[in-house]
Image (spheres, rainbow, N blue to C red):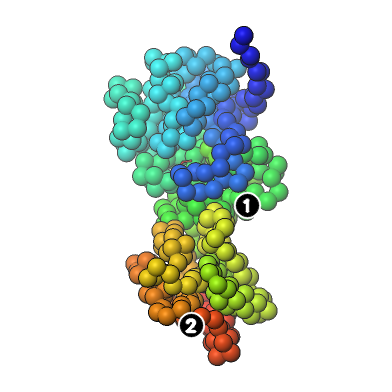
Amino acid sequence: MTIVIEVNIMKSVKIADGVYWVGVKDWDRRMFDSLIPLPEGTSYNSYLVVGSEKSALIDTVNPGFEGELEGKISEIVDVADIDYIVMNHAEPDHSGAIPYLLEKNEKVILIATEKGVDMAKAYYDVPDKRIMVMKDGDVISLGGKTLRFIEAPWLHWPETMFTYLVEDKILFPCDFFGAHLAGGFYDDDVPNLLTYAQRYFGEIMMPFSAMAGKALQKLENLEIDIIAPSHGPIYRNPRRIIEAYKRWSSGEIKEKVLIAYVSMWGANEAMVRELAALLTAEGVDVKVHNLVNADIGEIAKDLVDSAVIVLAAPTVLGGAHPLAIYAAYLVKALRPPARYAVIIGSHGWHGRSKDSLLEVLKGSKLELLGDLEVRARPGEGDYEKLRQLAQLIKEKVRGGVE
Ligand code: FEO
């Protein structure tokens, strides 16, 4: 006997006349790129635009959800009747259903940037005859619905672009303006949405802040009523997220210090607690992350607007504790706007923590503001040095936001 369990999956949602959300809420996903924790899942937003003559699907969904996507599309049009698939971004969370759709629909044409064509072939074996290349500013008409394509490279891969629906003033920017969040449909459903968006910016967009700034300039003269990203809620009040992206991508920092530490026998923890207390007493916003159980996404979020980064770690195995090496690597790779680093460390017989962390950070724009290395445990003289470090940090934090 076969047991069939009926799953009541969310239906398609009309977001404007002829424009439908046909995406997927992935409540269970807990990691992205095997790197970024997703404590609240994510969504793969796909949008169907139906004109009087043609229809286009903007972005698809993660592999494994093809059937759910097809079910939602089928509420509106037959999958075999879609004319275009717009591939704003080739990463599989948005384009993983392309091979399935191409097989179900023999006529559908994939729209991509020139670099997107290369990606579509490499990842999905899409043949040339099924691809149409779009350049910046190119348009296609679906009949009363005009799609304009805006090249926006490196947001988040080299091939990325945005799609703008002219008549309805809807921007489909794929990853840009996204948030890894399964819950909520519109921005006003999620009161603290900007916190999720900042985390996402730190994880995905911060390394490409310069490109984000260029893309925002391109959007400057565009009338935008709705931003429909491919992760997280849809913005029907787009101003707030646009302004936040301007701040984040321009490297606007706060009177804020991020401390990431690891402690084996309590010395680094004691110094971090003291430093955090001294700074907090001065009115500095301090975020402390214990690397043993830290959420990398939260660290990325705090890197977006911190003025100073403090790394604290003991020497073990001939260098800084591996968790601190990992954190330093991420700090370098994510390219946060902070200009100053402070390194704290401890050792039993030979201190090698600072040098190994500086080696990892080499090539970043971080300047070493100060450091403190203690043997075994901090003594009174070390606490005095911490007070001096706190003073130095406070001056830089205040200077950084003036
Ligand atoms: Fe949501 Fe870069 O993929």
Label 1 crowd (10 A; few <14 / some 14-19 / many >=20): some
x, y (%) of residue 130?
Answer: 33, 22
Q: Quadrant of the N terminus?
A: top right
Q: How far apart are the alpha carbons under marks 2 and 1?
A: 42 Å
User: Vertical placement of 381 versus 310: above or below?
Assistant: below
Determine whether the residue tagged by mark 2 lies in a helix, strand or loop.
strand
Which amino acid lies under the numbered mark 2 shown in the image of this protein? Arg
The circle drawn on residue 164 is none
Which amino acid lies under the numbered mark 1 shown in the image of this protein? Leu
Q: Residue at point 62% right, 74% down?
A: 273
User: Vertical placement of 222 versus 147: above or below?
Assistant: below
User: Vertical placement of 342 versus 24: above or below?
Assistant: below
Label 2 crowd (10 A; few <14 / some 14-19 / many >=20): some
x, y (%) of residue 353?
Answer: 42, 73
**Front position in the image: 207 or 113:** 207
Q: Is residue 222 visible?
A: no
Q: Residue furthest top?
A: 1
Quarter of the image where one finds residue 384: bottom right
**Front position in the image: 263 or 391:** 263
The residue carrying mark 1 is 194
The residue carrying mark 2 is 375
User: Vertical placement of 108 versus 207: above or below?
Assistant: above
